[in-house]
Amino acid sequence: MLESLDTIKTIALSELQKTSDMKTLRLWYSTHLSKSSQLIKSLRNLSNVAAKDRPTIGKHANDIRKILEQAYEDRTSYLNKSVESPGHKHIALDVTLPGRSLNRGRLHIATQTLRRIYTIWADMGFQIYRSREIETDELNFELLNIPLHHPARDMWDTFHTNSPGVILRTHTSPGQIHAMQANAPDPIRVILPGMCYRYEQITARSEIQFNQVEGLAIGTNIRFTDLKGTLSDFARRMFGTSTRTRFRASHFPFTEPSAEMDIECFLCSGEGCRVCKKTGWLEILGCGMVHPAVLTNGGYEPKKYTGFAFGMGPERIAMLKYGIDDIRHFWGNDLRFLEQF
Ligand code: PHE
């Protein structure tokens, strides 16, 4: 009888070690400590045992019950802890695993393109000159040879503020006047980058805000050939060494003569494709020799000084370069677009 009680204890304790959760633990309890378990039954049936053996056997069975109850409680708290931090016993920290990578931001595609343009012009000796986005009508138009009722104003409809004559600049060209007035009569070689605004119907091709990079070179003996050479050099640095350029006559009130520069389409190399609309050429910028009236307004004597100016749109350049079909993507703040660059 005593031996069989010991066997019950050994089996019960070894099975307790195998319990892995509350469910198996409850099952263990009903097998080994419930009223229907062998141990408790044997305690109940002590009356069947010979009277002289009763105290010894009864005490032994009771001791075993206490041991099992204690073991059950210990196991319960052990398993509870394991549930709180699952597997803490089994999974060691693997310090050789790679860390979780941080989701890094990046520069906006317009900023990337602007910086590329800055670098090229800096290499050619042009300084960056910052000029304000809120301008006066005088600087945005009048001093650039666009008087109040000039039809060319239609091209540059913009946003007005509550202060009369104070507007959001429609192009970076008023920066030419700032740069000239600050430097006359010294020679100038600057680029003027920044945001411009126009009151436009928003379509895939036009936005109410966009960047421009203006360029201005003033000095003695600067000629149209300098303009052509410098801008063609820029195109080769920006789009590849074999890029061909062509200049088409155009009109801007603040330059004379005026031109637009096209580059040979880099997608089809002049064959004609969807991007260049079958022409083989892509329009990149407007340019010209600074108009004498503008030189005078900037403080330079037009008989002595000459210069050239140009204006390009970095978003437009990025659209051509990466085949972006809609200018509204730039300021739409959609990560699916931004993360591609
Ligand atoms: N300001 C002109 C535009 O917005 C571009 C330009 C700049 C043309 C300088 C000639 C010289 O379209």
Image (cartoon, rainbow, N blue to C red):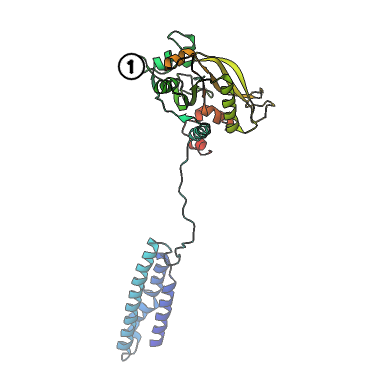
Q: Is residue 39 above or below residue 101?
A: below
User: Badge 1 local density, few (<14 within 10 Å), some, or many (20+)?
Assistant: few
Foreground residue among 340 and 26: 340
Q: Where, quadrant-wise, is the N terminus in this rendering?
A: bottom left
- In this rendering, position of residue 276 left or right of residue 295: right
Q: Amino acid at mark 1?
A: Ser
On screen, residue 83 above or below 127 = below
| Mark 1: secondary structure | loop
Q: Relative to 198, is 37 above or below?
A: below
Q: Position of residue 90 (x, y in %)?
A: 45, 67
Q: Residue furthest top?
A: 149
Q: How many marks?
A: 1
Residue at the farthest bottom position: 52
The residue drawn where x is 46% and y is 28% is: 193
Q: Residue 71 occupies which quadrant of the picture?
A: bottom left
Residue at 42% from the left image edge and 83% from the top image edge:
7
Residues 316 and 221: in front is: 221
Residue linked to disc 1: 163
Seen from the viewer's position, the closer of residues 238 and 79 is 238
Q: Quadrant of residue 129?
A: top left
